């Protein structure tokens, strides 16, 4: 039989286990709910059949048939409207029924029985009164007297009627629950039930009328003559006190676990997991643990525990089942029992928790927290339990049969509130953000705000450590200052992979879900809400500075007022100088947005100086920008966005520099742009940018900077595409392969042959693979397919004209850009512009 799965139990918390194991009866002293259902048919003498929601006129007529409700004081029945002010109507004065009412009431009673934890008893309900609470009505705190034999509780069903206030407040053993039963939905019945030994009151109705049916909950005797203990509210005060004591002790002892995961007995789906759906002993223990956690200052959550293993395996009796001619029994992935295989070795495994629910039953994103050794209880809970998933994977190639198996079980998770951040950091710094955001939103005093600031600073410290650890482990980098900086980046696969090594999507250390710059934005927004300028400065200087991509620009600008002009200018200037070559579009966007903010507000000398430093940093970085490599996988999409300078970003930059008013900076920017066609390609960037500026109201003629850019774009495009491309006259391809083997020599001879378009290489597989690699690596303009006939098979290479077709497509785009340039100056062109326009017109004519 396969060895059992490794489970990280804690065998040192037996007192805590024993205290909680004794809690088995579910239920609470009060329960509530609502159902959308057909309304009952209620016929009141001299009033008629009630409508829903009950109109005010009908309520007034109903009150006219009622009497003031008394209350019990000792053995007396007393009428005192200073204690109880409510109208009542006895059952003989009204009838309740309807085709669907019996089924609806059975549903309500079943929900109540389950909520009160008395499913094992024989319970019925007896209609007692119809009550009307008009405006100002109430009932002060009291306990119900036994009105009939076997009564153990009270059920209230509120009929749809417009009102506010009148909350039911129930107290028991130091706990208090307030139930709001207001509402006027026509098809909704709200209800609440509680044990008779609980103190309760009805708060004052502030407006409208509350109309409700009151039932006595009765416990039926099982056998005549045999006594049955009366049902009372579930009372686990002794167990709760002991669990509280043991919980505090468990986390205070040396070597204590960081958290405790208590496995639930029943199975719950991740989608439907909540405190409300817990059943049986799970519900009872959750109730006790919620109270104990509050007393011990611990957090409590629900989650799904995953314990997973995989590794090599062997089939049992595979020899007898193996098909003839097979050396090993193969079969596809399939579920398997333990009897099907034996584990050779557990080579990989993980234990973690996800699918989080807070104690308020709200879903929250804490990521996947690792479940560590000694954090799982009760000990032995999964012994002899079959895994929830178990499958065998077929053998393939040199790999043998392997297995995968896992448990996925719901659990209650507890840890000290003082360690909340440390626990969440196990999943990564980004797992702390929902918690910090929730606490920041709830902080109403300066003291509470300071607590959240302290937690946020601990997260920043951990974030810094992880960024440093990641950077230390990454040796690869791009030397942007090397010779040939303006040369186009190679489009071979190796260069693209190097780029991913540095700027791939794995940008945020510690982020389990790799959410990237979005988490930095959330953290900065949180720190802004807390008005914590020192932490904003630290976070920008250590985290954003190392990982800035561009999406953060808007939230960085929002931080500027908190930082102040001098600090903001220094930080943003340093950020741009450090990140300009990695995220030029984002750096430009940061300056543009800062300039826009200053344009809307009066520019003070200190902010003008700050903006000047930022602008200089952007302009100084323009000459060293590179054309980004083409995206070869989805991993590079995010970085491609911020590396590729688009026309709108350039137009925004030029417009912002013009508004800033520094002629020297504008001239320097134009000089850098015209000297760096690799980054500012005239066709795809510069010409559309000039068109965008024209559309915004700028002119080409008469604006020295725009004229300079226009002339540069025209000269580059004319140099490239003033004359049409010559059509290839033969199939010759000049190439030099890096390998000098006989096969590669034959390939070069074929490539240089002007007549032959196709060549067949009949050879074994390793030689075919080698030639295919050479064709791809050197970008030969030929297609290759393997003809799978005979042995050895044949590699068929066919020359294509894809390069020519790509160059032709580029030529046509260049002609289109030249046409745009001519249209931008129109008839206003003079001098150099006019001569360029004449050449453009001739080039366009040749292209037809």
Image: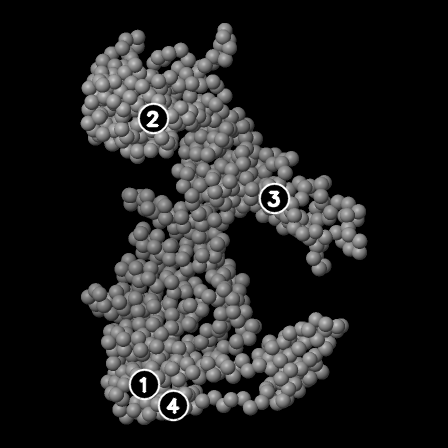
In percent of the image, x 47 and y 18: which residue is there? Answer: 122
| Residue 128 locus on image (x, y percent) | 33, 17
Q: Verify CB contact (< 8 Å) between mark 4 and mark 3.
A: no
Q: Is residue 223 visible?
A: yes
Q: Quadrant of residue 523?
A: bottom left
Disc marking residue 40: 2
Q: Residues within 10 Å of mark 1 (few under 14, many from 20)?
A: many
Q: Earlier in the sequence, mark 2 or mark 4?
A: 2
Q: CA gap, disc 4 to disc 1? A: 14 Å
Q: Earlier in the sequence, mark 2 or mark 1?
A: 2
The correct choice, above or below, for 144 with respect to 514 in the image is above
Q: Earlier in the sequence, mark 2 or mark 3?
A: 2
Q: CA gap, disc 2 to disc 3? A: 47 Å
| Residue 777 locus on image (x, y percent) | 60, 77
Numbered disc 1: secondary structure: helix
Numbered disc 4: secondary structure: helix
- Residue with the mark numbered 4: 845
Q: CA gap, disc 3 to disc 1? A: 68 Å
Q: CA gap, disc 2 to disc 1? A: 81 Å
């Amino acid at each position: 039989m396969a060895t059992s799965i490794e489970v990280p139990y804690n065998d040192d918390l037996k007192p805590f286990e024993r205290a909680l194991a004794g809690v088995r009866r579910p239920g609470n002293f009060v329960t509530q709910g609502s159902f959308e259902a057909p309304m009952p048919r209620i016929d009141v003498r001299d009033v008629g059949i009630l409508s829903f929601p009950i109109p005010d006129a009908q309520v007034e007529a109903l009150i006219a048939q009622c009497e003031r409700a008394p209350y019990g004081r000792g053995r007396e029945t007393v009428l005192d409207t200073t204690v109880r002010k409510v109208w009542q109507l006895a059952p003989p004065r009204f009838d309740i029924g309807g085709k669907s009412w019996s089924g609806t009431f059975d549903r309500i009673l079943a929900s109540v029985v389950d909520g009160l934890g008395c499913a094992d008893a024989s319970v019925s309900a007896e209609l007692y009164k119809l009550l009307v609470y008009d405006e100002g009505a109430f009932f002060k705190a009291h306990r119900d007297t036994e009105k009939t034999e076997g009564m153990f509780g009270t059920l209230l069903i509120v009929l749809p009627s417009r009102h506010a206030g009148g909350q039911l407040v129930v107290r028991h053993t130091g706990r208090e629950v307030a139930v709001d039963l207001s509402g006027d939905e026509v098809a909704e019945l709200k209800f609440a039930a509680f044990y008779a030994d609980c103190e309760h009151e009805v708060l004052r109705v502030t407006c409208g009328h509350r109309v409700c049916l009151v039932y006595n909950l009765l416990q039926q005797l099982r056998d005549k003559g045999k006594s049955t203990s009366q049902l009372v509210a579930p009372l686990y005060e002794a167990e709760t006190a002991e669990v509280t004591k043991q919980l505090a002790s468990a986390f205070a002892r040396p070597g204590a676990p960081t958290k405790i995961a208590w496995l639930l007995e029943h199975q719950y789906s991740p989608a439907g997991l909540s405190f409300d759906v817990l059943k049986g002993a799970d519900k009872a223990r959750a109730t006790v643990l919620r109270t104990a956690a509050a007393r011990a200052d611990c957090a409590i959550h629900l989650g799904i525990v995953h314990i997973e293993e995989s590794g090599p395996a062997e089939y049992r009796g595979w020899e007898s089942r193996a098909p003839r001619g097979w050396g090993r029994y193969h079969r596809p992935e399939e579920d398997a029992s333990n009897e099907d295989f034996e584990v050779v070795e557990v080579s990989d495994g993980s234990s973690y928790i996800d699918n989080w629910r807070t104690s308020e039953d709200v879903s929250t994103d804490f990521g996947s927290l690792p479940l560590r050794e000694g954090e799982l209880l009760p000990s032995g809970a999964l012994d002899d339990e079959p895994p929830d998933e178990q499958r065998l994977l077929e053998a393939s190639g040199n790999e043998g049969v392997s297995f995968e198996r896992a448990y996925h079980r719901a659990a209650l998770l507890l840890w000290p509130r003082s360690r909340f951040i440390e626990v969440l950091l196990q999943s990564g710094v980004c797992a702390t953000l929902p918690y910090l955001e929730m606490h920041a939103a709830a902080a109403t005093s300066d003291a509470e705000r300071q607590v959240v600031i302290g937690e946020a600073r601990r997260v920043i410290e951990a974030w810094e450590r992880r960024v440093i650890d990641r950077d230390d482990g990454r040796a690869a980098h791009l030397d942007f200052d090397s010779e040939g900086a303006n040369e186009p980046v190679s489009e071979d696969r190796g260069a693209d992979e190097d780029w991913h090594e540095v700027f791939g999507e794995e940008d945020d250390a510690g982020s389990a879900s790799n959410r990237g710059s979005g988490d930095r934005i959330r953290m900065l927004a949180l720190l802004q809400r807390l008005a914590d300028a020192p932490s904003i400065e630290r976070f920008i200087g250590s985290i954003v500075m190392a990982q800035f991509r561009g999406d953060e620009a808007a939230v960085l600008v929002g931080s500027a007022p908190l930082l102040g002009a001098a600090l903001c200018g220094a930080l943003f200037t340093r950020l741009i100088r450090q990140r300009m070559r990695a995220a030029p579009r984002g750096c430009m966007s940061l300056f543009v947005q800062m300039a826009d903010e200053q344009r809307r507000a009066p520019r003070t000398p200190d902010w003008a100086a700050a903006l000047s430093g930022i602008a200089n940093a952007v302009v100084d970085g323009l000459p060293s920008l590179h054309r980004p490599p083409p995206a070869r996988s989805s991993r590079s999409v995010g970085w491609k966005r911020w590396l590729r300078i688009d026309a709108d970003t350039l137009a925004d930059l030029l417009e912002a520099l013009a508004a800033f008013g520094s002629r020297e900076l504008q001239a320097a920017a134009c000089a850098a742009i015209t000297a760096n066609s690799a980054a500012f390609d005239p066709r795809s960037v510069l010409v559309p940018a000039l068109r965008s500026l024209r559309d915004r109201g700028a002119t080409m003629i008469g604006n020295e900077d725009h004229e300079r850019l226009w002339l540069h774009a025209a000269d580059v495009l004319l140099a490239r595409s003033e004359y049409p491309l010559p059509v290839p006259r033969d199939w010759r391809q000049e190439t030099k392969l890096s390998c000098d083997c006989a096969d590669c020599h034959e390939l070069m001879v074929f490539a240089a042959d002007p007549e032959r378009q196709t060549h067949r290489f009949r050879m074994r597989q390793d030689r075919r693979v080698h030639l295919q690699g050479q064709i791809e690596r050197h970008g030969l303009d030929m297609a290759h397919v393997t003809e799978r006939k005979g042995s050895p098979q044949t590699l068929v290479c066919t020359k294509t004209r894809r390069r020519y077709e790509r160059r032709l497509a580029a030529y046509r785009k260049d002609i289109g850009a030249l046409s745009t340039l001519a249209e931008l100056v129109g008839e206003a062109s003079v001098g150099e512009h006019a001569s360029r326009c004449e050449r453009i017109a001739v080039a366009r004519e040749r292209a037809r």
